[in-house]
Image (cartoon, grey):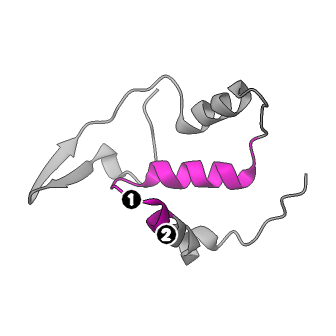
Amino acid sequence: MIIDNAAVDSVRLLANRGGLSVQLPAVEVSQSPESKFREYLTSRPKPQRYTDQQRDMVNFIFAQHNHFDAEQLIDDMKRPAFASAGPRSTAP
């Protein structure tokens, strides 16, 4: 399976290394990031359910093509493009 993400135009990923742009090819994977994360949650000693918020976070993280730290991730996820879904209830 090849990751097909709307955030990746024509499978062109650019990495900035010392001012040089490097085009990276698509990477073939056996599972999507979402299905791999679901597998992780169910493999834990106390399995956890997969929430909409977790799905949104996994999709957001794998749409990023640069390095980030936790604070940057939180700030980026607060931006209108991500937060437009609005607050959600955590009750089942």
Residue extent of the magenta highlight: 50-73
**Mark found first going from the N terminus, 2 or 1:** 1
Q: Residue at x 54, y 75 (%)?
A: 79
5, 70: nearer the viewer: 70
Amino acid type at mark 1: Phe
* Quarter of the figure with residue 66: bottom left
Q: Which SS class for mark 1?
A: loop
Q: Alpha-carbon neighbours of circle 2 within 10 Å: few (<14), some, or many (≥20)?
A: some
Query: Mark number for residue 60?
Result: none
**Residue 31, image x and y in percent?**
53, 27
Marker count (numbered) = 2
Apparent side of residue 19 relative to residue 14 in the rendered image (left or right): left
| Residue hosting label 1 | 68
Q: Is residue 30 above or below residue 34?
A: above
Amino acid carrying label 2: it is Asp
Is 87 magenta? The answer is no
Q: Farthest residue toward the front?
A: 45
Q: Quadrant of residue 64?
A: bottom left
Please tell me how crowded label 1 is: few (under 14), some (14-19), or many (20+) other residues with Cα within 10 Å. Answer: few
2 and 1 marks in contact (CB < 8 Å):
yes
Camera sees residue 92: yes
Q: Residue furthest bottom?
A: 80
Residue 72 lies, with reference to residue 54, above or below; the image says below
Label placed on residue 76: 2
